[in-house]
Amino acid sequence: MAKMFKALGDPIRLRLLSLIAAHPDGEVCVCDLTGLFDVAAPTISYHLKHLREAGLVDHDRRGTWVYYRPVRERIHRLSLLLASSDLAMPTT
């Protein structure tokens, strides 16, 4: 779980995951993501690699393009953990 949280600690990766998870087709081409950021395409690929390695997104290569989709069960696990009372801060 720590690897997933670490991957989401970067604002670009957090936004990428949000865009991928919210895409109406359930997946999105990297070509549709790169223009949404003020960084170069290789930087987007670098951040997507971190999301893949953390198990938050999966991908398929189709010709020259790569399509990304969220790994919903992993995102759901994160959501459950965040909602858990085990993480609640003690009140003083």
Image (cartoon, rainbow, N blue to C red):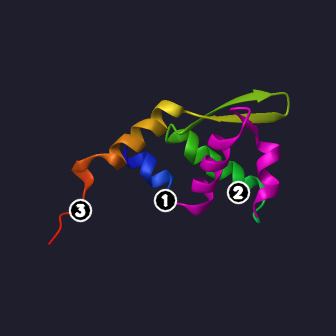
In the rendered image, residue 13 lying in the magenta stretch gets the answer: yes
- Dot 1 corresponds to which residue? 9
Magenta residue check for 44 = no
What's the residue at 74%, 53% (across, down)? 42
The amino acid at mark 1 is Gly
In this orientation, which residue lies closer to the viewer: 3 or 23? Answer: 23
Front in this rendered view, residue 17 or 44: 17
Disc number lying in front (3 or 2): 3
Q: Which residue is mark 3?
A: 89
Q: Which residue does the image show at 42% across and 47% down from the upper left?
A: 3
Q: CA distance from mark 3 to mark 2?
A: 35 Å
Element type at marker 3? loop
Left or right of 40 on screen, residue 10: left
Mark 1 → mark 3, Cα distance in angstroms: 20 Å
Label 1 sits on a secondary structure element that is: loop
Of marks 1 and 3, which one's residue comes earlier in the chain?
1
The region drawn magenta spans: 10-37
Q: Which residue type carries mark 2?
A: Thr
Position in image of residue 92 (x %, y %): 14, 72
In the picture of the structure, the residue carrying the numbered disc 2 is: 43
Q: Which image quarter is the N terminus in?
A: top left
**Above or below — where is 85 with respect to 64?**
below
Which residue is depicted at the point 75% across and 63% down? 39
Query: Residue at coordinates 41% horizontally, 43% vertically from top-left?
Result: 78
